[in-house]
Amino acid sequence: MTQRAFLIPLILLLCIGSSMPSEASERPSPDFMLDATAKVQGEFFIATVSGITSAPDLWFKEENFTMFRQKNGSYRALVPVENMTSPGSYAFLVKKEKWEEKVPVTVASNNLPVQKIWLDKKTNSLKATKEEKAQVKAALRTLSDTKLWSGPFIYPSNGRKSSPFGVKRSYNGAPVSSYHKGLDIAVPQGTPVKSPAKGKVVLTGYESNRFHVHGNTVVVDHGHGLTSIYMHLHTISVNEGDMLEKGDTLGTVGSTGISTGPHLHWGTYLYGTSVDPELLVRNEY
Ligand SMILES: [Zn+2]
């Protein structure tokens, strides 16, 4: 039998197989989609499941991600690739009752330089207080069902970008232990800081109330696991619970907390993991 003659019956068999009445044809099997199978450290995957009536379970790197219902009825999660993730192969796993899919993906280095920082003993020992750490962490992990943002983000302040997101940091000659979890914008003290998208204020923290490292801080929840933070503010003009439209002022630029001069530190987070804010300005999600 030629190869072709062999293929035709096989195709026929497959067609018959898929048209046979079964549980699967009554309830079409869900469809799992990723926007790409490769990402760079500090970016995020867009995972979507359609053809399903309630949220499936989604895992990436052994972490479970809540999927949120979209207007079109599908479920979606913007899954962060933490900036310190080792480049290599990983997989997404998605499950709902008897349906399960595993999709291999890869993560590449963002090739950002390592910044060597030398601190004197006194500065090196300055640490965030328990209170500020716990409150900031909880606020950045807010998961809310309503997607408040739409369209691309705007920059909260326009000015010179003095330090990009993701630069890896080594302190006093030790191995890389952390990275810059936001974008620094150098603008004069008193410059208004605007909400880059619609959101709800979930935290206001004050230097005078133990926010020694972050300084005066605001965290905004944009919904569906996306939050943003504004640090080292001179003044804060909002309260927890306030709803902000895109462009509403939330405070002014300052140099409170550990800061070498007036600048805005702007961070964006998905499920509590920082991602590059520039992505949200460049694209619509
Ligand atoms: Zn910064």
Image (cartoon, rainbow, N blue to C red):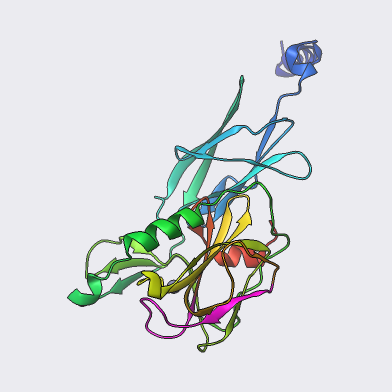
Up-down: is 277 above or below 48? below
At a point 62% along the width and 40% down the height, the residue shown is: 67
Q: Is residue 109 visible?
A: no
Q: Is residue 83 left or right of residue 212?
A: right
The image position of residue 244, as x and y in percent, is 67, 67
Going by the image, does 229 lie left or right of 180? right
Q: Is residue 250 magenta?
A: yes
Above or below for 15 versus 185: above
- Residue 46 versus residue 39: which sits nearer the camera? 46
Q: Residue furthest bottom?
A: 188
Q: How many marks?
A: 0
Q: Position of residue 135 (x, y in %)?
A: 43, 58
Quadrant of res 278: bottom right
Q: Nearer the viewer, residue 143 or 157?
A: 143
Write down the region rendered in magenta.
Answer: 247-264
Does residue 37 belong to the magenta stretch? no
Secondary structure mostly taken by the magenta-highlighted segment of the chain: loop
Q: Quadrant of the C terminus?
A: bottom right
Q: Is residue 43 visible?
A: yes
Q: Splitting the image into four quadrants, where does ligand 1 fall?
A: bottom left
Q: Is residue 113 above or below residue 51?
A: below
**Residue 200 relative to residue 163: left or right:** right
- Image position of 172 (left or right of 72): left
Residue 149 position in % (x across, y down):
69, 59
For the point 52% across and 50% down, the residue is 271
Residue in the image at 35% along x and 62% along y:
178
